[in-house]
Image (spheres, rainbow, N blue to C red):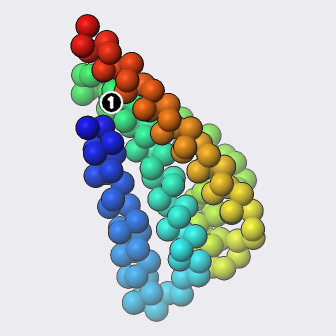
Amino acid sequence: MVWGKVSACFVIVPVQAAVWIGLMVVNGIHVSGIVPILLHVSVASLLMILLSAFVALHYRERTSAQFIFSTALVVVLIGVLSLPANPANLIVLLSIGAAGSEHWIVLAVMTGILAAGMAALNRYMRIVEKTALQ
């Protein structure tokens, strides 16, 4: 059930990003690196969606979950955006064709974190299910 909700949230991300890129191209704005941009946007968004899934599983009351998620997201975004090779900066560099190969390293690290997060979410779902059944 949780993975269905995660998937529903995620499916729109690459579609929305592709539509935005398409609108920029239609308006005469050249965009380079479309595929790497979509990859970075998708992985970064899925990481945020996983964070929300963890919070929703842990805090059953909606008000608490929303507050904790918002606060955690601000802390995570400040931490990530303080890095010199952060995903937002890399997406801008990719769009103008100025990103070096370091964006692949960042994408690989983010994908590794994503894989670990997905495994951790699976483990946490089992723990929550066991405690709910008791």
Label 1 crowd bin: few (<14), some (14–19), many (20+), radius 10 Å: some
Image coords of residue 16 (percent x, y)? 35, 67
Image coords of residue 50 (percent x, y)? 43, 40
Q: Residue at x 33, y 50 (%)?
A: 7
Q: Is residue 32 in view?
A: yes
Q: Is residue 133 left or right of residue 99?
A: left
Q: Is residue 75 left or right of residue 124?
A: right
Q: Quadrant of the C terminus?
A: top left
Q: Quadrant of residue 25?
A: bottom left
Q: Is residue 64 left or right of residue 79?
A: left
Q: Residue at x 26, y 15 (%)?
A: 132
Image coords of residue 111 (percent x, y)? 59, 51
Q: Compared to 91, does 115 lie above or below?
A: above
Q: Does dot 1 land on a helix, a strand or a loop?
A: helix
Viewer-closest of 45 and 85: 45
Q: Quadrant of residue 133?
A: top left
Q: Is residue 72 in view?
A: no
* Residue linked to disc 1: 56
Q: Name the residue type under label 1.
A: Ala
Q: Residue at x 36, y 75 (%)?
A: 19
Q: Compared to 36, does 63 lie above or below?
A: above
Q: Quadrant of the N terminus?
A: top left
Q: Residue at x 31, y 12 (%)?
A: 131
- Tag count in the figure? 1
Image coords of residue 44 (percent x, y)? 51, 52
Q: Is residue 134 left or right of residue 101?
A: left
